[in-house]
């Protein structure tokens, strides 16, 4: 697990500066694959079927179903060639470095309490980088990937911090994500029909207008 | 006990039933019957609770105490009155071809699913399931917010979905941290019990304070997004203004309550663990800030539904503030405020729904002279606005004045801020509404109006303003004991 954690974090950084939707989705698949390996290694270590269940659920949802859905919509709505216009990748990367330092300061008091502090740091970073991805991008698909990468970070947190959640909660969360992605798909179609693109910045009718 | 099972099973049954009913009229009536029976069933939990005290059900999966029982009954009541209103509203919408039959079918399925999610969130004993159902309540309402499929509606649905989902995933991280410290400190080996409220509450003082502190920050941001606390409130006015009126009533009257309920549950744990006022102080700051910002933003609203959604933010801010003060009196006021606000705000959105149907617009300056053209509706709108602005002897006034009195004792500076906020909000609401009710009427399309359920809510608010029944008092006192341990 210690070996793979930095790779998961690395994919988060790559997601930030990616500007093609296809490569974004495949980076997300990479991230999920690393996470799946972490789950599997956890399953080997612990007795009982719980981790195998979450491993299978994870693969089915995050590596097969969700990327399939995303590819499907990208194809259907003709977005292959469109790039999300990230204006200042350097600024984004720089802010991600600042975030890293901030996170380190934030969890510093926990050094004595938690043995696996580095992993917690990484989990928090994945979550915060996911939020940064949401802020810097303006394409609906990249929003969804940002959301899913936050979800990945949280999943990693459950693995390293608590050795998984109770099965009933885990199934509940998996189900929620499944429904969420389906709903995202429905909204993609509706947004595309209404503004003829998936650029979130073009949806600006509901603003507090300043006079 | 049967009453409790029935309360949860009815919306589940309702969801499945609505999946099978294609006819709008039958679905509407089924909705009314189901929610009414649900309300009656939830009432029957009260005597059982009063006899036996708090209890867990189904191997500790569900937990009922005074705190969630009050909100469960409130929830079933509001869903019932809203179902009565939505019957007429939806049929009218179909008639004027605002929505299709398929959309109304979706509406009824999601209506029941939403009730199910809210009731599960309120009654579950498992803090993980609480999160799952909170997310479920977002998911079940996203398509309803965008039901009209206009550009604005889709934008509102998108904002609502992204902000609430991302916000609430931070709450999940907070929950995980709580689970971690529970497992570590309490050496709970049995899988799953580390998230059970009934276990945690007895062990809360053993939880690691540092981790609990960090967890609460995440929880406050996460659930605070759903409560609509400033600066996380952006989704709220959009979602409330673009969704169909019954949905706005439910979002404002129920969803915000449930999010606050979740936050307070965690606040109890944090208070026990830290033995200081950190959680309370954070809630005071966020609550007061939301109150002031929303009161100021009320002034320049041009859309009648946005106006009242800012009023929701304002009141939720005040309620959060009241709970944040962490004294028995203020907690009592907070709970009472929660109840009267739900009743008033849901009835206001029903009345506004009627107004919009008559005038075909949400823009305030296009709604003119309602008292002349539709006296009944006009007066209702005026009175309801006065009630939410805080006119005596209604419940909102009672809770505002009680809160102010409690504040004067605790800290006069806060009391002055509150006073200013009340005046600004009062002015903002009346200034915007008075032209809509008085003056020369604009053209309206006369259609059947249905405000009896709204009036029923308002009468309850009036009664609660002057007299709190002894059963409710007992429940509230028990809840206060729980929250301010």
Image: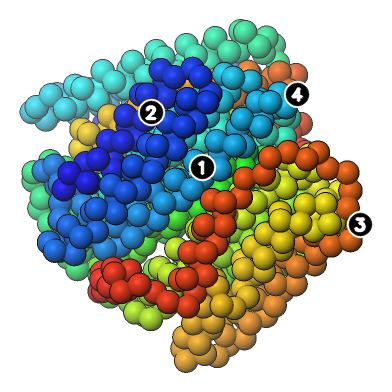
Residues at marks 4 and 2, CA–CA distance in whole angstroms: 33 Å
Q: Closer to the camera, A181 or B275?
A: A181
Label drawn at residue A111: none
Residues at marks 3 and 1, CA–CA distance in whole angstroms: 32 Å
State left or right for residue B198 relative to residue B171: left
* B385 w.r.t. B82: above or below: below
**Residue underneath mark 4:** A195
Q: Closer to the camera, A124 or B246?
A: B246
**Residue underneath mark 1:** B84
**Residue underneath mark 3:** B440
**Residue underneath mark 2:** B15
Which quadrant of the view contains residue B53?
A: bottom left
**Helix, strand, or loop for circle 1?**
helix
| Viewer-side label of 4, 2 | 2
State left or right for residue B230 relative to residue B213: right
* A115 w.r.t. B482: above or below: above
The residue that appears at 76% across and 57% down in the rendered structure is B375
The residue that appears at 46% across and 32% down in the rendered structure is B29
């Amino acid at each position: 697990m210690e070996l793979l954690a930095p790779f998961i974090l690395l994919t988060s950084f790559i997601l930030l500066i990616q500007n093609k939707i296809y490569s974004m989705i495949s980076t997300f698949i990479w991230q999920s694959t690393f996470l799946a390996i972490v789950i599997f290694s956890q399953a080997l270590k612990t007795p009982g079927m719980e981790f195998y269940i979450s491993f299978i659920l994870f693969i089915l949802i995050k590596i097969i179903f969700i990327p399939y859905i995303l590819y499907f919509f990208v194809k259907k709505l003709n977005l292959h060639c469109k790039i999300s216009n990230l204006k200042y990748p350097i600024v984004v990367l720089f802010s991600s470095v600042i975030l890293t330092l901030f996170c380190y300061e934030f969890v510093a008091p926990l050094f004595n309490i938690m043995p696996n502090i580095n992993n917690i740091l990484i989990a928090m970073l994945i979550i915060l980088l996911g939020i940064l991805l949401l802020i810097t991008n303006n394409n609906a698909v990249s929003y969804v990937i940002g959301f899913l990468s936050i979800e990945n970070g949280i999943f990693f947190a459950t693995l390293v911090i608590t050795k998984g959640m109770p099965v009933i909660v885990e199934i509940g969360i998996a189900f929620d994500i499944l429904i969420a992605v389906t709903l995202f798909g429905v909204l993609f179609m509706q947004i595309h029909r209404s503004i003829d693109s998936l650029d979130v910045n073009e949806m600006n009718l509901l603003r507090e207008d300043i006079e | 006990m049967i009453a409790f099972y029935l309360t949860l099973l009815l919306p589940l049954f309702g969801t499945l039933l609505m999946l099978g009913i294609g006819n709008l009229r039958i679905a509407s009536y089924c909705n009314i019957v189901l929610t009414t029976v649900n309300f009656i069933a939830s009432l029957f939990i009260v005597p059982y609770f009063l006899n036996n005290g708090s209890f867990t059900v189904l191997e500790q999966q569900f937990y009922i105490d005074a705190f969630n029982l009050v909100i469960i009954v409130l929830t079933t009541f509001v869903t019932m009155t809203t179902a009565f209103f939505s019957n007429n509203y939806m049929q009218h919408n179909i008639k004027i071809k605002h929505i299709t039959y398929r959309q109304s079918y979706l509406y009824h399925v999601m209506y029941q699913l939403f009730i199910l999610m809210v009731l599960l969130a309120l009654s579950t004993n498992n803090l993980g399931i609480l999160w799952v159902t909170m997310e479920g309540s977002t998911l079940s309402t996203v398509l309803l917010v965008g039901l009209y499929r206009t550009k604005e509606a889709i934008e509102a649905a998108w904002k609502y979905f992204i902000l609430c989902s991302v916000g609430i995933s931070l709450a999940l991280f907070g929950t995980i941290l709580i689970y971690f410290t529970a497992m570590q400190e309490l050496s709970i080996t049995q899988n799953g019990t580390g998230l059970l409220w009934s276990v945690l509450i007895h062990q809360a003082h053993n939880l690691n304070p540092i981790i609990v502190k960090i967890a609460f920050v995440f929880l406050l941001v996460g659930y605070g997004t759903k409560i609509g606390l400033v600066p996380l409130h952006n989704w709220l006015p959009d979602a409330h203004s673009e969704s169909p009126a019954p949905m706005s009533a439910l979002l404002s009257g129920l969803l915000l309550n449930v999010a606050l309920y979740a936050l307070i549950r965690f606040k109890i744990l944090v208070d026990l663990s830290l033995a200081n006022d950190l959680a309370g102080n954070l809630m005071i700051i966020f609550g007061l800030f939301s109150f002031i910002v929303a009161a100021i933003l009320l002034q320049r609203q041009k859309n009648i539904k946005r106006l009242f959604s800012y009023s929701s933010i304002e009141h939720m801010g005040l309620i959060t503030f009241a709970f944040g003060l962490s004294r028995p009196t203020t907690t009592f006021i907070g709970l009472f405020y929660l109840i009267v606000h739900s009743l008033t705000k849901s009835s206001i959105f029903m009345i506004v729904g009627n107004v919009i149907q008559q005038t075909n617009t949400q823009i305030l300056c296009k709604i003119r002279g309602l008292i002349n053209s539709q006296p009944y509706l006009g007066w209702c709108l005026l009175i309801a606005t006065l009630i939410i602005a805080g006119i005596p002897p209604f419940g909102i006034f009672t809770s505002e004045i009680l809160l102010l009195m409690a504040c004067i004792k605790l800290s006069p500076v806060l009391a002055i801020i509150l006073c200013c906020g009340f005046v600004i909000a009062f002015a903002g609401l009346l200034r915007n509404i008075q032209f809509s009710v008085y003056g020369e009427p604009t053209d309206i399309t006369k259609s059947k109006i249905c405000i009896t359920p709204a009036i029923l809510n308002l009468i309850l608010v009036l009664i609660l303003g002057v007299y709190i029944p002894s059963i409710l008092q007992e429940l509230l006192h028990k809840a206060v004991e729980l929250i301010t341990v």
